[in-house]
Image (spheres, grey):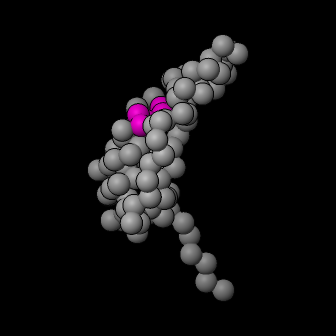
Amino acid sequence: MTRTLALEIAVQDPAGVRIAAEVGATRVELATALALGGLTPSPATLELAVETAGAEGPEVHVLIRPRAGDSTTPRTSSSSRSATCAGPSEPVPPVS
């Protein structure tokens, strides 16, 4: 039985998405500040990454992490996470 492995690459911008597609990645994890462990990208970066991937490119998955440091957050920061996750007020249209 032959199994195909999926390749996921962490990227931080549309250029990274393009490179990941060229090397055959099936998924990308989009984040900024990878040197800090990754932070949530801006809605504009997400939109450009999805456009770059296109219909035939890798799936774009977004890292949701609003700040550097450990993953323990005070209760008051849940509104910050919600605002960070909200992203664009309009849905990003699928690329055809």
What is the number of callouts on the image? 0
Tell me, yes or no, whether the highlighted magenta stretch contains residue 40. Answer: yes
Judge whether 69 appears above or below 28 on screen.
above
Residue 94 in the image: x percent, y percent? 44, 58
Residue 77 in the image: x percent, y percent? 62, 17
Residue 9 in view, yes or no: no
Residue at the limit of the structure toward the front, as seen here? 90
- The one nearer the camera, 56 or 88, is 88
Q: Is residue 35 left or right of residue 19?
A: right
Residue at the limit of the structure toward the right, as seen here? 75
For the record, the magenta segment spans 38-43
Residue 40 in view, yes or no: yes
Q: Is residue 25 left or right of residue 82?
A: left
Task: State the residue at coordinates (48%, 46%).
Answer: 91
Tell me, yes or no, whether the highlighted magenta stretch contains residue 4. Answer: no
Judge whether 74 appears above or below 93 on screen.
above
Q: Is residue 70 left or right of residue 55?
A: right
Q: Is residue 36 left or right of residue 23?
A: right
Q: Quadrant of the N terminus?
A: bottom right
Judge whether 44 appears above or below 80 on screen.
below
Residue at the limit of the structure toward the bottom, as seen here? 1
Task: State the residue at coordinates (52%, 29%).
Answer: 84
Residue 87 in the image: x percent, y percent? 49, 35
Residue at the limit of the structure toward the left, as seen here? 15
| Image-quadrant location for residue 78 | top right
Tell me the chief SS of the magenta region. loop
Task: State the residue at coordinates (37%, 49%).
Answer: 49
| Image-quadrant location for residue 24 | bottom left
Q: Quadrant of the C terminus?
A: bottom left
